[in-house]
Image (tube, rainbow, N blue to C red):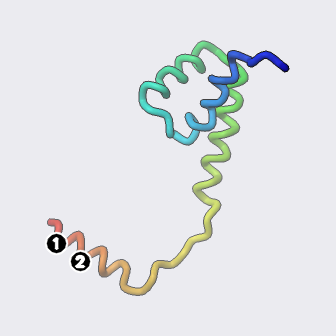
Amino acid sequence: MKPADPHDEMRDLTAFYALGSLTQREARSFEGHLNEGCRRCNVEVGEFEAVVSDLAFAAAGVEPPPGTFERVRQLTVRVH
């Protein structure tokens, strides 16, 4: 059995960091790791960030059902 790479735990955080799903404390800790110059994690974060940005454009635009904008407008009028 291959011994666990202690670096694997940090590398596992790269996807979560790119998605913005780490807690503030976890993100700061991970940013410290990145700032220490970990080339592997910096490269992986860059790759994951590219995928995350592409996800925003992956879904096809869908027209909302008729009347949606009017219902939202009425809700916002009631709140103010």
Q: Position of residue 73 (x, y in %)?
A: 27, 75
Q: Quadrant of residue 57?
A: bottom right
Going by the numbered disc 1, the residue's amino acid type is Arg
Label disc, if present, on residue 1 of the rendered structure = none
As drawn, which residue projects farthest toward the top? Answer: 36
| Quadrant location, the N terminus | top right
Instruction: Tell me which residue sits at (67%, 46%) in the image.
Output: 51
Residue lying farthest to the right in this orientation: 1
Tag 2 residue: 74
Please name the amino acid that badge 2 sits on: Gln
Residue 52 sits above or below residue 11 on the image: below
x then y, percent, for residue 27: 49, 28
Percent coordinates x, y for residue 53 in the rendering: 61, 48
Which element type, helix, strand or loop, lies under badge 2?
helix
Residue in the picture at 44% in, 32% down: 23
Tags 2 and 1 in contact by the CB under 8 Å rule?
yes
Query: For the view shown, which residue lies furthest in the bottom direction?
Result: 66
In this view, 3 is above or below 26 = above
**Does 40 sit above or below residue 67?**
above
What is the residue that sits farthest to the front in this orientation? Answer: 1
Left or right of 66? Residue 5 is: right
The residue at the point 30 percent across, 74 percent down is: 72
Q: Residue at x 48, y 26 (%)?
A: 26
Cα gap from disc 2 to disc 1, whole angstroms: 6 Å
Point out the image quarter for the C terminus. Answer: bottom left
Residue at the disc numbered 1: 78
Location of residue 61 by image quarter: bottom right
Position of 60 with respect to 47 (left or right) is left
Numbered disc 1: secondary structure: helix
